[in-house]
Image (cartoon, rainbow, N blue to C red):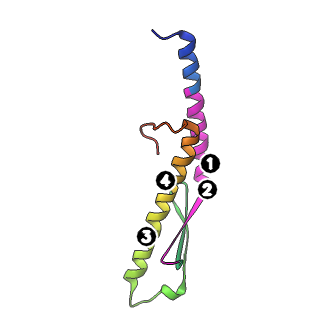
Amino acid sequence: MFGGNNMQGMMKKVQKMQKDMQKLQDELKQRTVDATVGGGVLTLTMNGEKVVERVHIDPSVVDPEDTEMLEDLIVAAVNEANKKVDEMMAQEMSKITGGMKLPGMF
């Protein structure tokens, strides 16, 4: 049904794609994204492993009487950074897969 050479060629391509994807995933873990919320009063830096590396909070938003607002800003920044990491991963992976959607991938 399938020619032996065609199947071998396809398997080599799949193996190369897997190797390239693993290499890219390792590289993306080293990249960071910044998410800024609240009109610039809170900036959060997250790496490709979705680990928060840095948070900068403008002192003007630190109000001991209104910690809820600061909590909301942190949640918004973490969610935005997560979204940016996912988008970065998907964009870079699509370069390897040619836009093909692969189950279990980003």
Give the class, few, some or many, for how many residues have Cα within 10 Å of label 3's Cα (few <14, many ≥20): some
Sequence-earlier tag: 3 or 4: 3
- 44 or 93: nearer the viewer: 93
Give the class, few, some or many, for how many residues have Cα within 10 Å of label 1's Cα (few <14, many ≥20): few
Q: Quadrant of residue 43?
A: bottom right
Give the class, few, some or many, for how many residues have Cα within 10 Å of label 2's Cα (few <14, many ≥20): few
Q: Position of residue 21 (x, y in %)?
A: 57, 39
Q: Amino acid at mark 4?
A: Asp
Q: Mark 4 highlights which residue?
A: 86
Identify the residue at horizontal 51%, vertical 47% (top origin): 90
Dominant SS in magenta? helix
Quadrant in which the N terminus appears:
top left
Q: Mark 1 highlights which residue?
A: 27
Q: Nearer the viewer, mark 4 or mark 1?
A: 4
Q: Quadrant of residue 47?
A: bottom right
Sequence-earlier tag: 4 or 1: 1
- 68 or 90: nearer the viewer: 90
* Disc 2 element: loop
Identify the residue at horizontal 59%, vertical 34% (top origin): 19
Q: Mark 3 highlights which residue?
A: 76
Question: What whole-number distance in Å separates the C-alpha atoms at marks 4 and 2?
Answer: 12 Å
Q: Mark 2 highlights which residue?
A: 31
